[in-house]
Amino acid sequence: MTIDIQHLISIVKKTAKEELLPRFQHVAKQYKLDGSIVTEADIAAQKRIQESLYNLYPEITLLGEEMSAEEQLNALSNHNGVWVLDPIDGTSNFSHGLPYYCVSLALIQNQEVQLGIVYDPERDECFYAQKDQGAFLNNKKLNAPDYSTSLNQAIVGVDLKRLPVKIAAELASNPPYASQRSLGSIALDWCWVSTGRIQAYLHGKHNLWDYAACWLILEEANGASKTINGDCVFTPTMEHKFAMAAVSTDLLNEWFSIINEKSI
């Protein structure tokens, strides 16, 4: 099966421009049982992308954030492959008028991420990658290690809210980096690592739809990532991941060592 990633990019872009941008700052939000936010824009974008993908590749199922846990597990078990979609990664930002959110789409086949697309409609920036073919931002090839630096000079993305209290307190009181940001979109944060805008990253709860696409993009940009236990971040499961990333392996190892010291 041949997948046309440029066609997929056009679907994602068109959906974001027609379903998300017109609703930005003009959308009502609701709270799910876990406290997270969902809007009519999430539902509309997921429905539209799902229909487009089904028309092109009916044998591939879709796993979307706005589905039940049972539906997600059933989708993931499809042997023909599964699309993993987050129609708005950064819904809290989107619903409050903060222009930092994206659409994230990945394809998992044969237990591996085959392609990933992350589109930021506010900046018209599309990050994308296919396995073993490199990563790109609007057709410009990405190479994260070009932006490498030492941790004490780095801007680091850290979501303190989702970290264990001891680690969060240690980082807040004695930061090992130059500056810290918490921007509110996992997929976009990882893509910004791949550009060197952020040099390292830490977040305590990655869902599959948050990280599948951006994980491949950072991998193909020669960046580095692992879980807090030192394992590969990606697995074709619904398991939450406590993960970190960096523009280079050396920086990741430095970051990993410090975080593990602070967790003791």
Image (cartoon, rainbow, N blue to C red):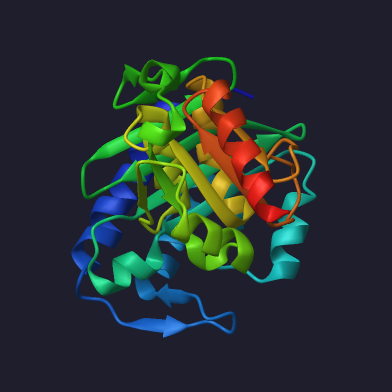
Residue 240 located left or right of residue 15:
right
Q: Does 210 sit left or right of 153 as displayed?
A: right
Q: Residue furthest front?
A: 174
150 in relation to 166, above or below:
above
- Tell me where residue 69 sits by quadrant: bottom right
Q: Nearer the viewer, residue 138 or 83?
A: 138
Q: Is residue 207 above or below residue 117?
A: below
Residue 142: horizontal and vertical position, in percent? Answer: 38, 20
- Give how far across and how far down residue 41 sits, in percent: 35, 68
Residue at (59, 80) in percent of width and height = 34
Quadrant where the N terminus is found in the figure: top right
The answer, for residue 65, to whether it is visible in the render is no
User: Residue 124 in the image: x percent, y percent?
Assistant: 23, 40
Q: Residue at x 46, y 38 (%)?
A: 200
Q: Is residue 146 above or below residue 35?
A: above
Q: Is residue 249 left or right of residue 15?
A: right
Expressed as whole percent of the image width and height from the top left, the position of residue 49 reads 45, 52
Asked if residue 35 shows in the view, the reply is: yes
